Image: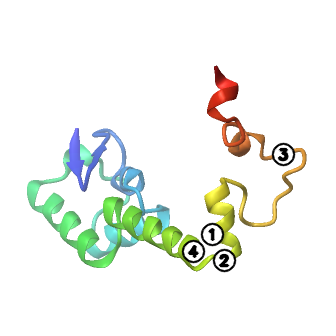
């Protein structure tokens, strides 16, 4: 297994498919990375050289927010929404859907453990 940016890549997968396992890289960005490196579409991860792995890591870290950096940015944005007191911040804080979904009959999984107090559990 190859280890790139906090993610294990499956050796028998194509590079463009294996790169999508990295948080923050979807299919389009994975194809862009392969095009920048000049890699063949059908090359497998176990056929890559050490130099190609280094170039993949360099291109991804320079051009894209991935893995922990992206997670930090997302969490920072959510905390900012909660601190300014906007509607989306309240919904995040309450654990409810944000984008106008129905909550009367659906969204039971996100509301499941929020309303149970400590005394009722015992």
Disc 1/disc 3 C-alpha distance (Å): 20 Å
SS of the residue under disc 3? loop
In this rendering, which labeled residue sits more in front, label 1 or label 3? 1
The residue drawn where x is 37% and y is 59% is 41
In front here: 122 or 61? 122
Residue located beneath label 4 in the image: 81
Residue located beneath label 2 in the image: 86
SS of the residue under disc 1? helix
Disc 1/disc 2 C-alpha distance (Å): 5 Å
Q: How crowded is mark 4: few (under 14 residues within 10 Å), some or many (20 or more)?
A: some
Q: In which quarter of the image is residue 13?
A: top left
Relative to residue 91, is residue 47 drawn left or right? Answer: left
Residue 54 place in picture, x, y as percent = 13, 63
In this rendering, which labeled residue sits more in front, label 4 or label 3? 4
The residue drawn where x is 81% and y is 65% is 100
Residue located beneath label 1 in the image: 89
Task: Report the disc number at residue 106.
Answer: 3
Q: Quadrant of residue 58?
A: bottom left
In this rendering, which labeled residue sits more in front, label 3 or label 2? 2
The residue drawn where x is 40% and y is 62% is 71
| Contact between labelled residues 4 and 2, with CB atoms less than 8 Å apart | yes
Residue 46 place in picture, x, y as percent = 22, 43
Dividing the image into 4 quarters, which one contains the C terminus? top right
| Contact between labelled residues 4 and 1, with CB atoms less than 8 Å apart | yes
């Amino acid at each position: 297994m190859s280890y790139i940016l906090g993610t294990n890549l499956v050796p028998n997968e194509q590079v463009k498919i294996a790169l999508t396992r990295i948080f923050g890289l979807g299919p389009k960005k994975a194809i862009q990375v392969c095009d920048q490196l000049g890699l063949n579409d059908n090359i497998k991860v176990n056929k890559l050289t050490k130099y190609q792995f280094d170039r993949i890591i360099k291109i991804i870290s320079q051009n894209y927010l991935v893995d922990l950096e992206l997670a930090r940015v997302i969490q920072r944005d959510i905390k900012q929404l909660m601190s300014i007191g906007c509607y989306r911040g309240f919904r995040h804080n309450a654990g409810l859907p944000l984008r106008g979904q129905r909550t009367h009959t659906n969204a039971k999984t996100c509301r499941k453990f929020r309303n149970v107090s400590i005394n009722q559990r015992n």
